[in-house]
Image (cartoon, rainbow, N blue to C red):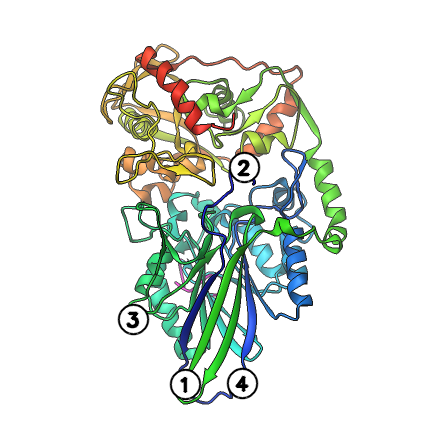
Amino acid sequence: MKRGYLIMGLFLSTLLTTTISCNSNDRVYPEEEVNFTIVQTTDIHGMIFPYNFITDKEENTSMAHVSSYLKQLKNEGKTILLLDDGDSLQGQPTVYYYNFVSTNEPHIWSEVLNYMHYDAVCIGNHDIEAGHNVYDKMAKELKAPLISANLIDENTKNPYFKPYAVIEKNGVKIAVLGLIEPAIDRQLPKVLYEGLAAEDMVESAKKWVKIIKDKEKPDMLIGLFHSGANYTDDKERYKNENASQLVAEEVDGFDIVLVGHDHQGWSGLGYDEITKQKNKEVKSPSGKIVPIYGGVNAARYIVSIDVSMKYDKDNKLWNAELKGELVDPSKFEADKEFLYKFSDAKKNIEKWVGRDIGNLNTKLVSDEAVFGDSYFLSFIHNLQFTIAEKELSEKADISFAAPLSKDAVLNNGIIKVKDMFNLYPYENFFYIMRLTGKQIKDAMEYSYGRWFNTMNDINDHIIAFKKDLNGELIFNNRYNSYDTVTPIYNYESSAGLNYTIDVTKPNGEKVIIESLSDGRAFELDKEYKVAINSYRGSGGGGHLIQGAGIDLKTLQNMDLVLKSTDKDLRYYIINWFEEQNNAVTVEKLNNWKAVPENYVEAAKKKDYKLLYPYN
C-alpha cells in the first residue's frame, strides 16, 4: 500500500448500461457492436519519468508506466480514445525546465502527448499559471486539440482555445467538451492570462452542448472538465471551482463526465464529501444517470472505461454498456521505448536540477510552521523583504507568507536547484501591494480564524479541523491525516509586525497587533507596503476578498499592486542563493506567538499526531 494515496472503496470496476439518444437521420450506422476504450490522465504535474527530480528517488508511476498500459490495450486489439485533463505544466522540474529554461526547444509535454497519440487535451489552471508564452507554444506544438470552452477572449467573447473536439472511433462520432475551473480569476495574476476570462461552467456547458448537438450530431458526448467533482464545500454556485457534478446535474446531454483538479479519484458514481455517502447516482435534469470518472494526480491512478455500443435502428438510439475502473499504472513496467525516446531530455534536466547553488547551516521544516513562528517561514519572509528591495526597489513594511506544503524539508548542507522545488512548490509571481492597516488586520483575522480552532479549555484542538455531521473529525485516507478547515497553504502568517494570537478568542478577535517590528505604531487607517505572492495577492484563499473585503475586480486589475516581478519567486530565490558567499544561517524572527502558551503546547502535542501520524 502506498502511504497517503489509498482511496478506500474506489478501485472497483463499475458497470453501467445506458441509452444514448442520437439526433441524426442521415448517417449510416454500423450493424455490429462497436467497442472502444476511453483512457483519461489528469493532473500529471510533470511526472513524465519514473523519477522524482526533487527527492532524487525512483518512482513507480509516471507517463512511462501509462505508455505501457496503453500498449497492452493495443496488443489486446482495443481502440483507444485517449484524453488528458490538464495541470501538467507545473510540479516537477521536468516541465519547469522547458517552461522557463530551455524555451527554444519543443516542450517536453507536447512531445510526450504527441508520442502517445492523445486525441484531446483540456487545459488546467496550473497550465495557465505557466503563462501565455508557454501554453500558447504548447497549443501550436500539439497534434491533438487543446480545448476549453469557457476560457474566452475578453474582446471577441469566443473561446481562446477550441471549445470541443470531435473524434471518430470505429464509426462512432464522439464529441468532447472541455471546461476549466473558473476560479483562476481569484487564484492567478492577470498577467498570466492577459486578455482572457473564465466563464461559469454551467452557463458555458448549456451554451456549447446545444451547439454541439445541433452542429455535430455526435453519437456520444463526453465532458472533459478540469474541475473537481464535488461542489458542496463551496457556498457560491456561480463560478464554482469544483462544479463538474453540478454541470452533470444541471445540463442535459452528457453521457460521461471526466474530471480533474481535485486529485481525488472518481470511479463512475457520485460521492458526497459531507455525508461520506458513496455510490450516489448523479442524474441529469432528464433523469439520465451520468457517470463521473476522474484519475489521481501524478499518474497514480488513471481512468479506463470499456465502451460497448449497439445501434437500435428502430428507436434511433444507441444502447451502451460502460465498464470503468481506476487503473494503477504501477502494476506495469515503465515503457523502455518511451524512456529511450526522452532519455536526452532527462539527462539535461538532471544536469540542471543537480547544480549547486549555495550552502545552508539551518535545517528548514514546514511542519513547524503549522503551529507557530518558524525558521521555515522566517526564511521565506526575509527573502521576500530582500527581493522587494533588490528586484523591485521597494522597502516593504510587512510580509505575508504561508507554508506551501505541510511536508517540506530543506536539509542543511549543499543546496541544489532541485531543493527549491521542495522549498517553494508553485510558480507564484511576487507583488508589493498597498494595503491599509485595517485590511491587513482583517486578512490576518481571516487567516487565523480558519487556521486555529477557538479553544475552550486545555483539552481542545488548536488546529481547526473539519468535522462531519456528527461532530467527528474527518480522516482522509489519501493523505493519511485528518482534514483541516482550510488547506495548510492558506496558513498565512505575517512578518514586519509584532503580534500574538489568542486562541481562546472567537474568530475576528484572535489577532492582537502590538506594533511594527521596527518599533513604529501600527495604524488601521494608514497604508503599508506588503510583500505577498501573486496567488494571495490575486485573491487566492479568500484572505483579501472575504477577509479584507477587497473587490475581486480591484485585485484582478492589480489596482493595489505597486510593483510586480516578471518571473516567479523560485527564480529569485535561486539567484539569491547563488549570490551568497558564505553558508546561510537562518534566524527565527520571533515576531509572533499563539497564547495561552500552556493551551498551545498541550494541543500541539495532540494535533501534531493527527496531521503527521507517519512521523
Q: Residue at x 52, y 25 (%)?
A: 615
The stretch in magenta equals 154-162
Tag 3 residue? 286
Residues at marks 2 and 4 touching, judged by CB atoms closer than 8 Å = no
CB under 8 Å between callouts 2 and 3?
Answer: no
Label 3 crowd bin: few (<14), some (14–19), many (20+), radius 10 Å: few
Instruction: Write down the residue under mark 1.
Output: 316
Q: What residue is rendered at 39% in x and 21% in y? A: 606
Pick whichever of labels 4 and 3 is earlier in the sequence.
Answer: 4
Q: How far is disc 2 from disc 3 in space, using C-alphas?
A: 41 Å
Between the residue at mark 3 and the residue at mark 1, the CA separation in whole angstroms equals: 18 Å
Q: In the figure, 597 relative to 125: above or below?
A: above
The amino acid type found where label 4 is placed reads Pro
* Nearest-to-viewer mark from 2 and 3: 2
Tell me where residue 473 appears, x and y as whole percent: 33, 34
Side of 138 where 432 appears, left or right: left
Location of residue 613 in the rendering, given as x and y in whole percent from the top left corner: 47, 28
- The reply to whether the magenta stretch includes residue 553 is no
Q: Amino acid at mark 1?
A: Lys
List the residue tagged with mark 2: 3
Q: Earlier in the sequence, mark 1 or mark 4?
A: 4
Please tell me in which quadrant of the rendered image residue 448 appears: top left
The residue wearing badge 4 is 30
